[in-house]
Image: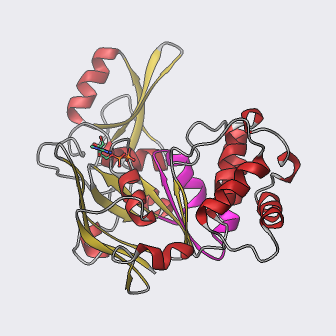
Amino acid sequence: MLSVHNLVKVYPGPVTALRGVGLDVPTGMFGLLGPNGAGKSTLMKILAGTLEATSGSVTLDGEDILADPMRVRSQLGYLPQDFGFYPNLTGEQMLTYLLKLKGVQAPNGQKRLAAELLARVNLAFAAKRKLKGYSGGMRQRLGIAQAIAGDPRILIVDEPTAGLDPEERHRFYRLLAELARDRTVLLSTHIVEDVAVLCPRFVVIAAGSIVAVTTPEEARKNLEGKIFEGTGTDDDLVALRDRYRVTQAVLVEGENRVRIHVPSGRAPSGFSPVVASLEDAYMTVVGSGPGGAAAPNGDGRTLAGATPVRAAAGGES
Ligand code: ADP
């Protein structure tokens, strides 16, 4: 089990990016969901050993991995958010180069290993193509190929689906789900759909703190009878934001279609109950409005009814 204990990161400035994060990551797919600037990449970089924490510890089966990152390096694969590619190399050349850089053992030769990895991520057909001709999804799959070299027990993927079109995203989901069958995959994302599709369990991170640990089903269930939908003018929307947490506001045929969170279950006139989505659950935590992360006293910063993280993570966060 990968465990994070009271992790703090303060960048020069100072900018406090992580404020005492505590977390247990089980085997399988585990999501880290949060808005931009929440601290996801900072946490992923520290776990992957590419950034030093200010304080706190990370253990893998009880062994401190921050104290000796090299010892556990072979057990960790990492796909960073800003993965760099050389556009004029072929997929095979780029991967072979990365494998050498990582010092991955290849008893049957680097070329053979590269071919096996490319096949694993369904890129064998593009091995000889230059990377400048790869789609976003193909590049991300190549990134996964280097991350899974050496068969690591833990795979850390930072915002891997950002910028992928829906078809590529779904292909990438399938690959991640397959990889999570026999290892831990820690997926950071700001896209609620990633978590809904992939993660039996996830945490929500906001402003450097973990604010909830839950499951998609639990998160939706806890909002039953509390999400309502209606339409209104721009002025109505302003008034609604003052009174309720607005979980969605979209223009449909020139009118605002608005979803609101009403903890009492007593909706304003003209609003009807709807089935809660995971997006509604997420917005009740990180959205602006009364009771959310933006509230001055921080009241309500738990995913409606989800396990408060203090209880789940041993009071560390
Ligand atoms: P996320 O991945 O959730 O978008 P980050 O971990 O990238 O969040 O950033 C968390 C906070 O730390 C943000 O306020 C960001 O501006 C700040 N930050 C990130 N990297 C640096 C850095 N190198 N120096 C100073 N501040 C940083």
Comparing 128 with 190, the one in front is: 128
Most foreground residue, 281 or 135: 135
**Residue 133 drawn at (x, y percent):** 77, 33
- Relative height, residue 238 to residue 66 (above, below): above
Q: Is residue 216 magenta?
A: no
Task: Say which of 308 and 156 sits in front.
Answer: 156
- In the image, residue 85 sits, relative to residue 157, either above or below, namely above
Q: Residue at x 31, y 23 (%)?
A: 237
Query: Residue at 81% across / 65% down in the picture?
Result: 116
Whether residue 199 is visible: yes
Write down the region rendered in magenta. 176-201
**Residue at the right extreme?**
125
Where residue 89 sits: x, y (%)? 74, 41
Query: Dividing the picture into quarters, in which one does residue 267 lie?
Result: top left
Q: Establish if 209 lies above or below 130.
A: below
Query: Which residue is depicted at the point 69% across and 36% down?
Result: 87
Please state the total of marks drawn on the protein image.
0
Quarter of the image containing the C terminus? bottom left
Q: Does residue 261 appear left or right of residue 114 in this picture?
A: left
Q: Quadrant of residue 122?
A: bottom right
Find the residue positioned furthest to the bottom: 62
Residue most extreme to the left: 297
